[in-house]
Image (cartoon, rainbow, N blue to C red):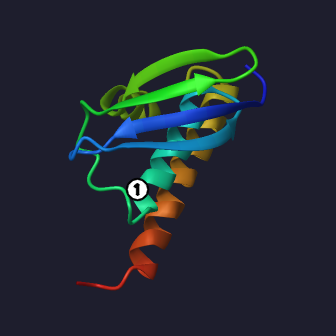
Amino acid sequence: MGLRTCKVSCCDLNGIEHIVEATADSLYEAVAQGLRVFRENDWVNDLGGGNTTISVVVKQPEVDHKVRVRDFERWLESQGRTPAEMSLKARLRELLDSRATRSRVTRPEG
C-alpha cells in the first residue's frame, strides 16, 4: 500500500466515537496503531471484544475500510505466509504488546 495517512475510528461501549490519525503502511498496521492509542487513552471507555468495528479511512485517495477487532486479532495470531507478512505481524504484535505493558505499568492501581 505504501505509507499513507489514515483516520482510524471506533465507538466504545457507551456509543462514543473516537478518531485518531495514524500513518501506516497497511490496513492492519493502521488498525494496530488505532487500537494502541484507544486502549491506552483514559478518555476511551471499554471497546468491547471481537465484534467492535474499527473504521479506517485512507487519505489521498480517500478509501474507507471497516475491520472487526476479532478478525484483526485472528489474522495477527495466524502464521504469516511470506517473510514480509511474518515480519509485519511480529512488528504489530510488538507494537500492541509494548504499549499495553507500558500502559499497565504507568497507570496507578485503583
Q: Is residue 57 above or below residue 99?
A: above
Q: Is residue 83 left or right of residue 46?
A: right
In the image, 103 versus 90, the foreground residue is 103
- Report the residue at 39% width, 73% height from top: 104
In the image, 3 versus 57, the foreground residue is 57
Which picture quadrant has residue 63?
top right
- The x and y percentages for residue 69 are 35, 33
In the image, 69 versus 12, the foreground residue is 12
- The x and y percentages for residue 44 are 36, 56
Q: Is residue 13 above or below residue 26?
A: below
Q: Is residue 44 above or below residue 69?
A: below
- The x and y percentages for residue 61 are 73, 14
- The x and y percentages for residue 85 are 62, 27
- Quarter of the figure with the N terminus: top right
Look at the numbered disc 1 and give the secondary structure of its residue.
helix
Q: Is residue 89 above or below residue 91?
A: above
- Report the residue at 29% width, 45% height from top: 12
Judge the density around disc 1: few (<14), some (14-19), many (≥20) Cα neighbours within 10 Å: some
Q: Is residue 79 visible?
A: no
Q: Is residue 103 visible?
A: yes
Number of numbered tags placed on the structure image: 1
Which picture quadrant has residue 21?
top right
- Report the residue at 41% width, 24% height from top: 67
In the image, 101 versus 11, the foreground residue is 11
- Residue furthest to the front in view is 16
Mark 1 lies on residue: 39
- Quarter of the figure with the C terminus: bottom left
Amino acid type, callout 1: Arg
